Amino acid sequence: MPILWLFLIVAAISVVGYVMGRSRALQSAGGDIRGLHSLPNFYGANVMLKTMVPAFGLLIIWLLVQPLYVNSQVSGMIPDTAIKEGSSRSLVMAEVRRAASGLDAAVSQGQLPASVARDPNADVAVVTQGLKDAGQVVTSEITQPILNAAQSYTSMNAVGYSAMSVVVILLALAGAAIGWWQTHADYRARNVVEQGVRVLLLAAASIAILTTIGIVLSLVFNTWEFFKLYPASDFFFGTTWSPSFSGRGGSSELGIIPLLWGTFYISIVALLVAVPIGLFAAIYLSEYASPRVRAFAKPLLEVLAGIPTIVYGLFALLTVGPLLLDVFGDNGLGWMKAGTAVMTAGLVMGIMLIPFVSSLSDDIINAVPQAMRDGSYGLGATQSETIRQVVLPAALPGIVGAILLAASRAIGETMIVVLGAGAAARLSLNPFEAMTTVTAKIVSQLTGDADFASPEALVAFALGMTLFILTLGLNVFALYIVRKYREQYE
Amino acid sequence: MNDMSRVERQVDTNSIKLECRDCQVYYGDTHAIKDVNVDIEDKTVTAFIGPSGCGKSTFLRCLNRMNDTIDIARVMGSFKLDGEDIYDKRVDPVQLRAKVGMVFQKPNPFPKSIYDNVAYGPRIHGLAKNKAELDEIVEKSLRRGAIWDEVKDRLDAPGTGLSGGQQQRLCIARAVATEPEVLLMDEPCSALDPIATAQVEELIDELRSRYSVVIVTHSMQQAARVSQKTAFFHLGNLVEFGETGQIFTNPEDPRTESYITGRIG
């Protein structure tokens, strides 16, 4: 039974349960709503919850667990002799799964009689021919063990799915019955539904957290694999980044320092652009601008935040790069060789960050109580003295938090770097030279044709992990500062 | 205004510091202050009383042009500090506020150290030539604010860490530090407990020897305790202005009598 049908059946049961629960509640109170503990809809919702939550919960768990269970059972059936030299059990299992889905497809297309496909003693040659006729991808000859494994894979899955359908529907019915049986004028359906809402919200929050943990774990395992192949000290302290592109060569030098330096340098340039401009813009908007100007200018400034970074990258490549080259290139001061440089990417990234700094700082400056400003004006201070000596010091921790958040954006930025700063990993102090960052290198290492198990590809995960820890640290630090600031006026 | 004659009689005894004539204030379309005439005398505590929203705080804020910071407020009429119109184009509101200091309803120390809070005004106006002079001003102001003994050992501690009453006295010390000629106080005790209120009231009485103090208050007992002159505001009008004792014992206007006996407001 397709899962969609199962889903619809459970939904239908729950709707019926809703209606029945509601009417039973009304009935138990003799038709008078005031005799009920909760409104009738809560009784209906209670039955609905008790139908849907256990049934769908079980469905999800079953869907997650069954493939694992079937895989481990089937892979236990494959004898060691069936695993060829240089291959592995997981590769054979992939072949088994391919064969199983191929058999299903061949049977449904009529190229292979169902009886043959299910027969454990079927002629391997016939089966292979049937699969080929059905246009299914068969890597090599289907062997007897693989055929048997594929057959039991199919049958176990079929049994599993029918069992799942039955159990889920039974559970839904049982849930509806319990909910219906509980329904009575005194039953506190409202409180139960309230609990249900709470759990729903909790589930949403935990999915977000679990995803973060999942991301970290996927990074950790691959990073671990990388450090088994490549010494950690060379990675962290190596000053050369030159991966070999042959894929299996051992001549790669994968030192992170040039990449970190590029990341750091470009981010610094970006922040040098974004922090003063963003901060001054925020001060103007919150302290000097009239409400009309503010209502008009603030959304306009925030539009900058909505521009996709690839568009900023194009701006860097096509406009800022050539412009800088005119001034600092061979025709001008002669410091710059090509349009792609730290300066190009940094300037454009800085423009991208202006709305982050200005919008957050503006909110923070507005949060400084008017009483502070009044106090300062009352002592005969001018507006700029008040801002410099009272408002900004009071808002400083929050502004630092905003700057740190902008910094972690800068560190994680990729597209502007790819298009604006070039691809050469280099340790240099000249801001008019091409450099590259950690993120840009992650992209190029994973989109190349290197073997996925080689250090050249796995290094991307180590780079990602390093970056993750750096930005996480920055974010935690920023949040800590922002929170400390919040306590000040309460 | 039949009490005007009596007010003018007292010019002989105490000179007029701040003379306000035909004052009008509009907030957008709202006429918040209507035809108010008040004379604030030197070295006198003048109390403004009246029900909430009657315009007494608004009027107070006219006296040091704090209403300039509110976009929609318009002030008209003549306000003369020592005979000079404070709304004249040549007068810098910033300089004026140094002469007419202000203490607010809620204690609002800056998030700085106690020392820096008091030194803020003198630093801005360049009142001290060097660190020693500044130290002297800070100590003198804190003594006048009647808080020196409580904070002298922790001048580097943040001003926000003090108790509410201490914070308010710190704010008074801060206002005193710029050597103002008039001190405006907008309900300075409404956020304080009775003990702190008593300390601040005592302080106000001491300040009278040097400054002209104008205090807005909701507490009629407080007005009676600290002030020599009292003005009663109602719905944007100045209803009655005169000797505090006169206002509280023998008011001329029936509205004043109703208010001080608790029947309106």
Image (cartoon, helix red, strand yellow):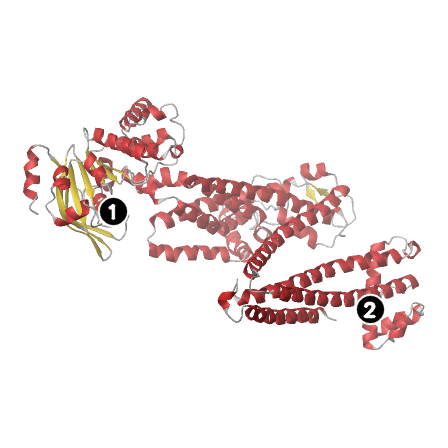
User: Which residue sits furthest front?
Assistant: A30
Q: From the image, tell me which residue sits under label 1.
A: B67
The kind of residue on which mark 1 rests is: Asn
Q: Distance between the residues labelled 1 and 2?
A: 83 Å
Q: Nearer the viewer, residue A437 or B222?
A: B222
Q: Which chain carries label 2?
A: A
**What residue would you read off at disc 2?**
A102
| Residue at 52%, 40% in the rendered image | A480
Element type where label 1 sits in the image: helix
Tag 2 secondary structure = helix
Residue B19 in sight in this render: no
Whole-percent x, y for residue A248 in the image: 79, 48
- Residue A12 versus residue A400 in the image, above or below: below
Classify residue A149 by image quadrant.
Answer: bottom right
Q: How many marks?
A: 2
Question: Residue A413, image x and y in percent?
Answer: 57, 50
Is residue A229 shown to the viewer in this render?
Answer: yes
| Quadrant of the image occupied by residue B100 | top left
Question: Dot 2, crowdedness within 10 Å: few (<14), some or many (≥20)?
Answer: many
Name the side, left or right, on which A134 lies relative to B80.
right
**Residue at the (51%, 65%) spot, across then down:** A35
Residue B257 horizontal side relative to residue A335, left or right:
left
The one nearer the camera, A151 or A40, is: A40
Could you say where residue B21 lies in the image, as x and y percent from the top left?
12, 46
